Amino acid sequence: MKNQPKARLATAWLDGCSGCHMSLLDVDELLLTLADRVTIVFGPLVDAQHFPENVDVAIVEGAVSSQDDLRLAQTIRENSKFVIALGDCAVTSNVPSMRNSIAPTRLLERIYISGATAQPGVPTQNVPALLRAAIPLHEAIKVDLHVPGCPPSAAAIAHVLTELLEGRKPDVASAAKFG
Amino acid sequence: MPNRISIRIDGELVQAERGQTIFEAAQSNNKFIPGLCQFKGLSTVGACRLCVVEVQGVNRLLPSCTTPAQDGMAVITKSARLNDYRRQSLELLFAEKNHVCAVCVSNNHCELQAYAQRLGVTNVRYAYRYPKLHVDMSHPRFVIDHNRCVLCTRCVRVCNEVEGAYVWGVAGRGIGSRIACEMDRAWGNSASCTNCGKCVQVCPTGALAEKGFAAEEMVKRQDLVERLATIRGTMNPGGPR
Ligand code: SF4
Ligand code: SF4
Ligand code: SF4
């Protein structure tokens, strides 16, 4: 065990509330095992600025809603062996999809111009353009495992990570559900 | 003609009553078949396609809730193929409307959500449609949210067959179908709704709910309506179909 090379784990936060990352941190003593056997190479939990190469497992939270989300999702797929859609936003597009029946231009005008109380104007600097619709991760890239839930329970995440560390493909159907 | 017939369900020889559907025969022998549109005591429509079974000698799958059990029939209720078709039906229901379980009044008390988990649906392989749909809040006590409706027509049937008020119908065609109140008026303007709430209680999803409940709070009381519907069925065998 000791000399086994550590697995390279990345996490990503697209259009979600970070609740899935919270649930990931909620796996209690499994964190100790993870610390021994896994290196976290990207994500909100570490400092890395660019998504690295040769990632073993990438865990993605959030729907694909903007140009930036789409580019990151594509990089994740290119550089990762196994991609997990974690939580309902990544799996179904969930709450972010509630904007999908309204065109982005109309949505932004409603919020930032007619709905603004000061400085009306749609922000364009340093914010990525919205996609026409917020889509689930598997509509943007190939996904190897879906773990639904809002958020998925810590037990479901722990099960997934434990199975992967043992080299098995996790069966999440009984442990995870929509909502 | 004897009133008892014998059929084979998943290889096991069981007794059923003549006139029972395959679904009812399975249920009275404690064999589980999933079903979303079926509701005990109401007429059957075969709308949801979850209850499909394989019948020996028949090439296509048959909805068990509308197929009469016949003496000597051999039925398969569980198989990889059936599970596949049932999952597809569920996924199509999710893709067709806007189900956002996390913020739904029926989260954790929903038959659609529960079947998805039970049948192992962890994602929807079809492209979501994201239709723009209406939420009618005009009724003083109840809400109909078309985003959550699976068009099972339980509400239509309970209102017609048990309450006798004939408030609900189905308007539109195909993918545009939706539940409509009377001649398509707001529910609050209904001339015949008695405010009995039966449609709300039998609705399998969060589409029909009582007002004043937040996410996860709407728990349906189906036992009472089921009892009324069953009594009606006993008093009036066959009932209006
Ligand atoms: S009706 Fe059921 S499946 Fe649809 S959003 Fe509500 S809980 Fe989820
Ligand atoms: S409340 Fe009763 S009468 Fe009114 S629509 Fe529902 S079932 Fe029909
Ligand atoms: S409103 Fe509820 S009971 Fe009526 S058809 Fe839709 S899902 Fe079924």
Image (tube, coloured by chain):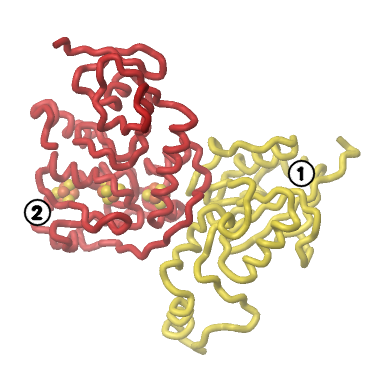
Chain colours: A yellow, B red
Q: Is residue B32 above or below residue A1?
A: above
Image marks 2 and 1: residues in contact by CB distance under 8 Å: no
Q: Nearer the viewer, residue B164 or A150?
A: B164
Question: What x and y, as percent, mark residue A149?
Answer: 53, 48
Name the residue beneath numbered marker 2. Answer: B192
Is the residue indicated by label 2 positioned so its CB lies within 8 Å of ligand 2? yes
Which residue sits furthest right?
Answer: A3
In the displayed structure image, the side of residue A45 where residue B87 appears, left or right? left
The amino acid at mark 2 is: Ser
State the image quarter where residue B43 is shown. top left
Question: What x and y, as percent, mark residue B88?
Answer: 44, 43
- The answer as to whether the residues below labels 2 and 1 share one chain is no
Quadrant where the image shows the N terminus of chain A:
top right
Count the marks: how many? 2
State the image quarter where residue A130 is shown. bottom right
Numbered badge on residue A34: 1
Give SS at disc 1.
Answer: helix
- Residue plotted at (16% across, 63% down): B185
Marks 2/1: CA–CA distance: 62 Å
- Residue plotted at (54% across, 47% down): A148
**Residue B82 visible from this viewpoint:** yes
Question: What x and y, as percent, mark residue A156?
Answer: 60, 41
Give SS at disc 2.
Answer: loop
The amino acid at mark 1 is: Leu
**Residue B215 visible from this viewpoint:** no
Q: Chain of mark 2?
A: B
- Residue plotted at (77% across, 67% down): A49
Is disc 2 surrounded by few (<14), some (14 to 19) or many (20+) residues within 10 Å?
A: few
Question: What x and y, as percent, mark residue A106?
Answer: 44, 79
